[in-house]
Image (tube, rainbow, N blue to C red):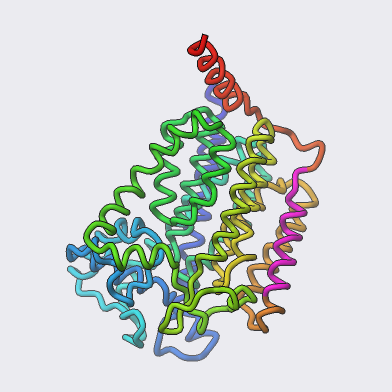
């Protein structure tokens, strides 16, 4: 009975060490890369997007949660869930009189606040590492293979945090994966709250809602969604009621800046919003159509968890296909899920690693809009094709999900009779 405990502790320590590795290497990159590689010691390579998040967290600390969309320097296009979590940290940095880099301006080359904000941001990599390992364990993947997989996941998450400064995406992925683990274990109440936490971190997690509903069935799905709506619903009310015009405009139009990022052919169809920005909404509607179709397939394949996981990878990965303005960290969630779906002890997994690494590196390069989009879409298609479950994959037990749906149907029939 006690035999699994030492192994569980060893697994936990492995993930702790990997998380620490992300923190150490991320801080080393930001502090030493300019001096060692670029021979410029006057600045640190801190992720620019993180300072918009820090500034928004400051506003929340000053009592302006309801007006985070009013200032263009916030650059916030999702719910302020992570900014709310970060507020105590930035208020502490103010109390310590640490310098920071103002978003949109040059600011100091070495903002000392990064010595506090940086490790906190990079620590967010731990949540997807732990939850994806829990999912892999639930899928029957052995310990050695899970450890190899977790190294690849850490490499996939690293650029989103160390280079781009988007820990909210890592947290959203982690919460969504843990919600899936709870669903597979038949624990509906925590699954709903975890899905709500994911939505509060990154609103685009709404694309996974059809898959969750398809997996658990509509009757159980209503209770799941009711719990999942509480946290993001609170944030929506907090920003929409006092400042409806600005909040609704940002959340519905999803403004994106083509100039510093990578444009795709979808830019021609994206509505122009002024100030050089375009709307990301239409492309995400197409991604939503893929999500709805995945939801129908999830209900059909609900007995096969491998196919459900592949559908989640599909929904997350196709975001890169339909974006008018592409930012490299958008590819991270799809790559991370595909690494689990392909199973680390298979040859296909090596191909997924190569395709995922190629996709990650390619999104940083500069090409024409068609060349960029075709290469990115091709690598995404190859990665998803290699991650497709094949015959012989061990199918985890989904009896709790199916049995719950059958019990609901039997109860409904009994009530009619």
Does 121 sit above or below residue 194? below
Residue 34: image location, x then y, percent: 48, 85
Residue 69: image location, x then y, percent: 31, 68
Residue 24 seen from this side? yes
Q: 26 or 384, which lies in front?
A: 384
Q: Which residues are magenta?
A: 373-389
Q: 137 or 290, which lies in front?
A: 290
Q: Is residue 381 magenta?
A: yes
Q: Is residue 167 left or right of residue 117?
A: right
Q: Is residue 67 left or right of residue 281?
A: left
Residue at the far front in the pictured view: 416
Q: Is residue 151 left or right of residue 273?
A: right
Q: Main secondary structure of the magenta part?
A: helix
Does 275 sit above or below residue 411? below
Does 15 sit above or below residue 365? above
Residue 31 seen from this side? no
Query: Which quadrant of the rendered structure holds the N terminus?
Result: top right
Residue 73: image location, x then y, percent: 33, 77
Q: Is residue 375 left or right of residue 170?
A: right
Q: Is residue 124 magenta?
A: no
User: Residue placed at 74% from the left, 34% from the top?
Assistant: 394
Residue at the far top in the pictured view: 417
User: Residue placed at 53% from the left, 79% from the top?
Assistant: 261
User: Residue placed at 39% from the left, 63% from the top?
Assistant: 251
User: Residue placed at 80% from the left, 42% from the top?
Assistant: 390
Q: Which image quarter: residue 97?
A: bottom left
Residue 410: image location, x then y, percent: 56, 15
């Amino acid at each position: 009975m006690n035999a699994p405990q030492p192994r569980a502790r060893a697994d936990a320590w492995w993930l702790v060490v990997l998380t620490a590795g992300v923190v150490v290497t991320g801080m080393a990159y930001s502090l030493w890369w300019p001096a060692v590689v670029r021979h410029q010691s006057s600045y640190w390579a801190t992720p620019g997007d993180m300072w918009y998040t820090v500034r928004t967290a400051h506003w929340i600390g000053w009592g302006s949660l309801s007006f985070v969309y009013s200032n263009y320097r916030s650059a916030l296009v999702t719910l302020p869930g992570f900014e709310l979590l970060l507020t105590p940290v930035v208020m502490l940095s103010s109390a310590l009189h640490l310098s920071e880099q103002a978003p949109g301006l040059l600011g100091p080359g070495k903002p000392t606040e990064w010595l506090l904000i940086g490790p906190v941001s990079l620590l967010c990599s731990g949540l997807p590492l732990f939850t994806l390992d829990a999912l892999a364990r639930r899928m029957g993947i052995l310990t050695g293979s899970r450890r190899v997989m977790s190294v690849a996941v850490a490499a996939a998450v690293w650029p989103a945090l160390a280079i781009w400064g988007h820990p909210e995406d890592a947290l959203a992925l982690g919460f969504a994966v843990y919600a899936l683990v709870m669903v597979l274990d038949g624990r509906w109440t925590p699954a709903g709250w975890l899905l709500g936490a994911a939505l509060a971190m990154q609103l685009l997690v709404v694309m996974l809602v059809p898959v969750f509903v398809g997996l658990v069935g509509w009757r159980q799905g209503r209770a799941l969604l009711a719990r999942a709506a509480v946290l993001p619903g609170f944030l929506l009310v907090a920003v929409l009621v006092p400042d409806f015009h600005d909040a609704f405009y940002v959340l519905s139009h999803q403004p994106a800046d083509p100039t510093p990022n990578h444009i795709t052919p979808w830019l021609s169809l994206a509505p122009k919003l002024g100030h050089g920005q375009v709307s990301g909404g239409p492309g995400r509607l197409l991604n939503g159509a893929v999500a709805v179709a995945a939801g129908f397939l999830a209900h059909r394949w609900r007995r096969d968890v491998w196919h459900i996981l592949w559908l989640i990878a599909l929904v997350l990965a196709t975001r890169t296909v339909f974006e008018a303005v592409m930012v490299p960290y958008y590819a991270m969630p799809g790559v991370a899920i595909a690494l689990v779906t392909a199973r680390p002890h298979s040859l296909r997994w090596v191909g997924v690693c190569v395709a995922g690494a190629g996709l990650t590196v390619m999104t940083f390069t500069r090409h024409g809009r068609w060349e960029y989009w075709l290469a990115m879409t091709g690598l995404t298609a190859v990665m998803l094709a290699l991650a497709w479950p094949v015959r012989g994959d061990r199918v985890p037990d989904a009896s709790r999900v199916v049995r719950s749906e059958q019990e609901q149907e039997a109860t409904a029939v009994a009530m009619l009779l």
